[in-house]
Amino acid sequence: MHGSHSIDVLEVPAGVGGAARVGIGGPVGSGKTAILEALIPVLTGRGTDLCVITNDLVTDEDAQRIRCGGFIDPARVSAVEAGACPHTVIREDPTLNIAAADDLEMRFPGTELILIESGGDNLASTFSLDLVDWWAFVIDVAGGDDIPRKRGPGVIQADLLIINKIDLAPNVGVDLAAMHEEAVAVREGRPVLLANARSGEGMTSLADELGRAVLFDR
């Protein structure tokens, strides 16, 4: 059953339903694909049976990048071409992504987790709960330390907010501690994760969060 919304517990009875579906959204350049590349080997190293769906406008470049990474069977990576605003196929009409996820589950019946990366979008981008059980929103320090203060729906509503590229903070004049504090405040204490996808920092914590939120009964 997809469409439940909980930070700590996925409301699916044990043994019922297929793979958990998790969204990864955020603006262009925030590091969504890099996070997937760093997260996949952590999850597969824990024995998680997973597949990936990428979304882009008119290309499958992100899917090809993940397929070539060597951490997952290329056949387990599907690409959806939105052909319009990226949020359309993850929020307004997610049928293309639902169909892609159903197809992956049919071809790989042991799948426990499907990671769905959105195309790069703005701070208002959110996932339909008809598509995903749980979703994370990625921002990065290079985008500015005022992003949390703007209180975009992606920042506020996501089950997990990821602040990526934390290694760049000194180079772009960002007070990382203050940015993190503001993010926690606007999210009223809900999870905020600091990450550096290029080095892998934060990926173990992200995998732990996924384990608690959506994989606990699988």
Image: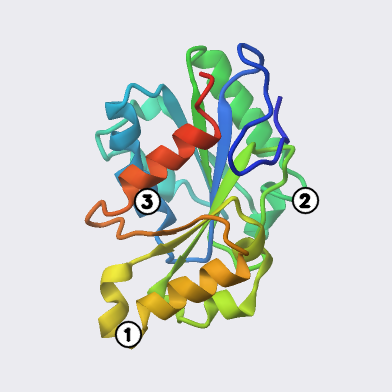
On the rendered structure, is 117 left or right of 7? left
Between the residue at mark 1 and the residue at mark 3, the CA separation in whole angstroms equals 21 Å
Residue 19 in picture, x, y percent from top left = 56, 23
Q: In this view, does 146 lie above or below 153?
A: below
Q: Report which residue position mark 1 lands on.
A: 172
Q: Report which residue position mark 2 lands on.
A: 92
- Disc 2 vs disc 1: which is toward the camera? 1
N-terminal of the pair, mark 3 or mark 2, is 3
Between the residue at mark 3 and the residue at mark 2, the CA separation in whole angstroms equals 25 Å
Residue 10 in picture, x, y percent from top left = 63, 32
Residue 103 in picture, x, y percent from top left = 59, 22
Circle 2 SS class: loop
Q: Is residue 88 above or below residue 95?
A: below
N-terminal of the pair, mark 1 or mark 3, is 3
On the rendered structure, is 23 left or right of 72? right
Res 37 seen here: no
Between the residue at mark 2 and the residue at mark 1, the CA separation in whole angstroms equals 35 Å
Q: Report which residue position mark 3 lands on.
A: 35
Q: What residue type is disc 2 on? A: Glu
Residue located 33% across and 88% down the image: 173
Circle 3 SS class: helix
Residue located 45% across and 81% down the image: 144
10 Å crowding of disc 3: few (<14), some (14-19), many (20+): many
10 Å crowding of disc 2: few (<14), some (14-19), many (20+): few
Q: Quadrant of the N terminus?
A: top right
Residue toward you, 214 or 184: 184
Residue toward you, 29 or 67: 29
Residue toward you, 95 or 200: 200
Residue located 36% across and 29% down the image: 74
Q: What residue type is disc 1 on? A: Val
Circle 1 SS class: loop
Q: What residue type is disc 3 on? A: Ile
